[in-house]
Image: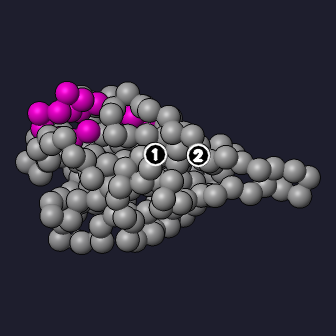
Amino acid sequence: MKIIATSIPGVVVIEPKLFADARGYFFESFSQRMFAEKVCDTVFVQDNESRSSYGVVRGLHFQKMPYSQSKLVRVIRGTVLDVAVDIRRGSPTFGKYVAIELSEENHRQLFIPRGFAHGFSVLSDIAVFQYKCDNYYAPESEGAIAWDDPDLGIDWHIPADKVILSAKDVSHPKLQDSDELFDYYENLY
C-alpha cells in the first residue's frame, strides 16, 4: 500500500499494490493493521455502497458531533471526482478542499478524517461507490454545505445543465453561513 499526502494534512490517497497477469488482478483493498501503521489508528464500524449515474453530485455531507465520521472511500465501478472540504473553524486549511479522481482503473482510495465535508460527482455512465465509516450513521446528526458554494470554487467536472441533485442537496447553506461546523483540533480521528 502506497500512501500519498495531499495538500491538506490528514487527507491521504491510498494506492494498493496490484498483482496483475493474464487472468486478471488481485489486490488487498483493506488491512486494519496496515491502515493503523501507515494512516491512523481508527476502527471502521460500518460499510456503505451507493450506485449513481452520470451527472449525480452527492454532497457536501458530514455528520455533526458526537456522531462525526472519518471515511475511507473507493470506487469499484466507473469514475468519480471525490471531494473533501476542511470545515474546521480555526484550521490553517479551513475552506480548502482536496479533489481526487477515483476509478475502477486506478483503484485509489481516499481517507477523509473527521471535520471534513465530503461529496462526489459521477463522471462515468454509472459509478458504484463504497465507503467505510468509523462511526455509525445517525440521521439526526446530518450536516451539509452547498456543493456549489462559489467561495469554495469546486469544479465538479460536470456541465451545470447536467448536474443531478437530491431534493435535500439543492438547498444547503454556504460554508460561511453554516453554524454546524467543527472546531479545529489536532487529533482528527
Q: Give me the disc on residue 171.
A: none
Say left or right for 144 vs 22. left
**Which contiguous range is marked in magenta?**
86-99
Q: Residue at x 14, y 40 (%)?
A: 184
Residue 153, quarter of the rendered image: top left
Q: Residue at x 50, y 67 (%)?
A: 49
Q: Position of residue 154 (x, y in %)?
A: 37, 32
Say left or right for 115 vs 157. left
Q: Amino acid at mark 1?
A: Lys
Residue 91, quarter of the rendered image: top left
Say left or right for 54 vs 176. right
- Residue 163 visible in image: no
Q: Position of residue 165 (x, y in %)?
A: 39, 54
Residue positioned most to the left: 179
Q: Amino acid at mark 2?
A: Met
Q: Residue at x 48, y 59 (%)?
A: 33
Q: Circle 1: is it few (<14), some (14-19), or many (20+) Cα within 10 Å?
A: few
Q: Position of residue 180 (x, y in %)?
A: 12, 51
Queried whether the magenta region covers residue 95, the answer comes back as yes
Do tag 1 and tag 2 residues touch (Cβ < 8 Å)? yes
Q: Work out whether mark 1 precedes mark 2 in sequence or the reverse, and give the earlier one.
A: 2
Q: Give me the disc on residue 38.
A: 1
Distance of mark 1 from mark 2, alpha carbons? 9 Å
Q: Which residue is mark 2?
A: 1
**Residue closest to the eye, 134 or 98:** 134
**Residue closest to the eye, 82 or 162:** 82
